[in-house]
Amino acid sequence: HASTHAAGVVIGDRPLVDLVPLYRDPKSDTLVTQYNMKFVEQAGLVKFDFLGLTTLTILRRGVDFISRMGQSVDLSSIPLDDPATYDMLSRGDTAGVFQFEGAGMRDVLKQMRPTRLEDLIAAVALYRPGPMANIPDYCRRKHGEAWEPPHEEIRDILEETYGIMVYQEQVMQIAQKMAGYSLGAADLLRRAMGKKIRAEMDHQRAIFTDGAMGRGIAKDKAVEVFDLMAKFADYGFNKSHAAAYALVSYQTAWMKANHPVAFLAACMSLAREKTEKLAALRQEAERMGIAVLPPDINRSEADFSVEQVEDGKYGIRYALAAIKKVGFSAMEALVAARNGKPFTDPVDFATRIDPRQINRMQVENLAKAGAFECIEPNRARLFHSADVILRRAHAQAQEAASGQIGLFGGGGEKEPLRLDTSPDWPEFERLAMEAEAVGFHMTAHPLDSYGLVLRKLGVTRASQLLAVAEAGVSRVKIAGCVVDRKERPTRTGNKMAWVRLSDASGGCEVTVFSEVLGRVREILVAGAAVLVSAELKLEGEALRITATDIVELEQAAAQRQSELRIWLEREDALPQLQTALQDQKGGAGRIVLLPGVTDSCDVEIRLRGGYRVTPLLGQKLRTLPGISRVEQV
C-alpha cells in the first residue's frame, strides 16, 4: 500500500515532477512522492516535518483569556527562571502541561526538581527507552554527587548534563574538539553511529583515533571515548528538537503557575468534545480552588469563558456547546439571539430563538444539564415542555416572516406558555440526567447524599488514597460512581477489568481480576454507585488499587443500622407513605414518624420491624405530598 507521512512536506528548487515521481492519494487531494524519505533527500529535496500542536492553540487562547481579565502577556518575553513555575514542576503538579502530564514524567520531575530550562530540555531528551536509564545519575549529580568527564578535554561540553552524553550535538562537538572534525564530518559521524553501519563505524573509528592522537590524546583514551560516543549516539536526542519542546512545556507550565484560570479555561476549550478530559480538568480546577460554573443560557458562551464571581476572583463558565448533542453552531445561534440581553423566562426564550437552529433534543439536553435554571428552576418542567417551547418559536418566526402582529401579544404582554406541570426530578434522577447531558456530575455528586453512610462504613475518599497507602494502610473501602469499565482477556482466557470511579473529591482506577469480575460485572455499569473493598499497593510512586469485593452502595447502606425521621404535615400523606415503605421492609434501619410541622413536636411514632434505610429512599419520600422533611440519622 502507499503510506503517507503524517507531517512530512518536501520542498525543491524546481517543479517536483522534474525531480521525483509523484502519486495522487485517492483518499485526498494530496500529492505524494513515490520515493520514501531517504531517497527524496538524495533526489535533491529538503524534507520538513510540520507538526500541528494543540498546545500552541491552548497558549494562544490562554493569552486571549488573560487579556479579557484585564492583563496582557507576551509569551516570548516571559522570564525563564520563574520560581513559581519550577516549584510547581518539582511537585509534579503538571496536569495539562505539554510533555509533562504522564505519571512517569511526573516522577522524573519530582526526582530532578528542575531549576532551569536546561533541566527541562534534558528531561524531554532522557525520558525515552534507553536514555531513561541515565535519569537517576542525572538527578543525583544535579543534587551534588561528584562526576568526572571521560576526558578533561570535553568537560565543558558535558558540564551542562553533568558528564552524561544526552544530545547528538554533544557527540558532534566532542568529535570536533577531540579529533578535529569539521561540522560536516561530525554530522556524518553522528549519522553513521545512529545507523550502526559497521564498515562506516570502523572507518570513523580510525579517523577519530588518528585525529585525537594528533592532538596529544592517548590511543586507548581515544578509543574509550569513541566507544562511549557510539553507545550514546544510538539513542542520543537532537537537542534543538528537545529545546523547542521544552520551551513550549515551560510556557504552558508558566501559564498554569501564574494564570491558572486562563490556562485551564483554554485547556477545556480545546477539549470541548472530550468528556473524559473535561472531567479531569474540572477536578484539577477544583483541586486548585478555581470555580467551574455550570452551563447557563444567560451567562455561558458557546465556548468556555472566564467570568468574575462574587468574591472578585475569576471562575470558568462551562460552555453550552460542551453539553452533549447540542452542536457548536446551534449554541452560537442561541448566544446571538441573547445578544447581550438575558432571557427573562421560558416565553421570552421561545420568542427570541431561531427555531431553524434549535431542535427538541437540544432543548432537552440543555434542560437536563441545568442550563435553564436561571429562568425556570424546575428542570423536569422545561425538559417535558421542549415541544411547547419550539411550537411557540416556530409560530413566532412565521408571524415575523408574514409581518403580522398581535397573535402572541405583539408589542404588549406575551401570551403565557402552557408548560408541563410535572414536579422536578428527585435529586438522584436530576444528577443522573445532568451526568447524561454533561458527561459527569457538575452541580453536585450522587454520593453527597451518602455522607452519613460513608462515614459509618469507614470509606476512604479518592483524594486520600495515595496518602493512606504511603502511611502503610493496605486495605480500604472506596465508594464511587462507575465512570467507565474496560475489560481485556488474561493469559488463562478469563477477563479482568479496569474500572474508573469518581467521588466528590476526585477519581481513581480499580483493577478487578476475573474471580471478582465474574460476580459483580452486572453492577459495574456507568453511573452505578458502588462500594469497593480494595487492597492498596505502592509500585514506585504509582498506586495500584485491586478490588477484593464490590457491592451496590444502596445494598451496603440498607444493611447499616440507621434511622429515618419523617415529618408529616397532613394525615392524607400516610397512604402514599405506606405504599412507598412496603417494599423496604427487612433491613436493619428504623422509621420514625413525627406528626406536625415544627421541630418542637414531642410525639414520635416508631414503626415496627426493620427497614432498608438508604439516602435514595429518603429522597423518594421527600417528593411525596404532605411530607415536609426527611432526615437520616
Image (spheres, rainbow, N blue to C red):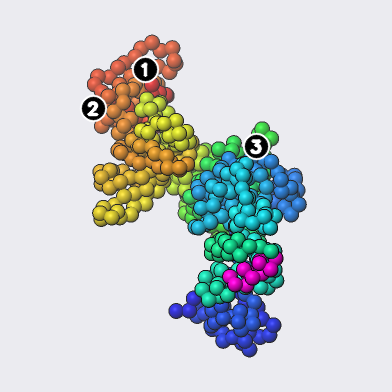
Give the residue type at disc 1: Leu
Q: Earlier in the sequence, mark 3 or mark 1?
A: 3
Classify 10 Å Cα crowding around label 2: few (below 14), some (14-19), many (20 and above): some
**Residue 572 shows in the view:** no
Residue 309 shows which numbered tag? 3
Place of residue 173 in the rendered image (x, y in percent of width and height, measured from the top left): 67, 63
Q: Amino acid at mark 2?
A: Gly
If you read the primary sequence from the N terminus, does the residue marked by circle 3 or circle 2 appear first?
3
Distance from label 1 to label 2 (Cα)? Answer: 22 Å
- Residue tagged 2: 586
Q: CA distance from mark 3 to mark 1?
A: 41 Å
Q: Which mark is residue 594?
A: 1
Residue drawn at 27 percent across, 47 percent down: 514
* Number of the front mark, 1 or 2: 2
At a point 40% along the width and 12% down the height, the residue shown is 601
Point out the image quarter for the N terminus. Answer: bottom left
- Magenta extent: 204-215
Could you tell me residue 541's position as x and y percent?
47, 41
Which residue is at 55% across, 68% downward? Answer: 194
Quadrant position of residue 533? top left
Secondary structure category for the residue under label 2 = strand
Magenta portion: prevailing SS class: helix
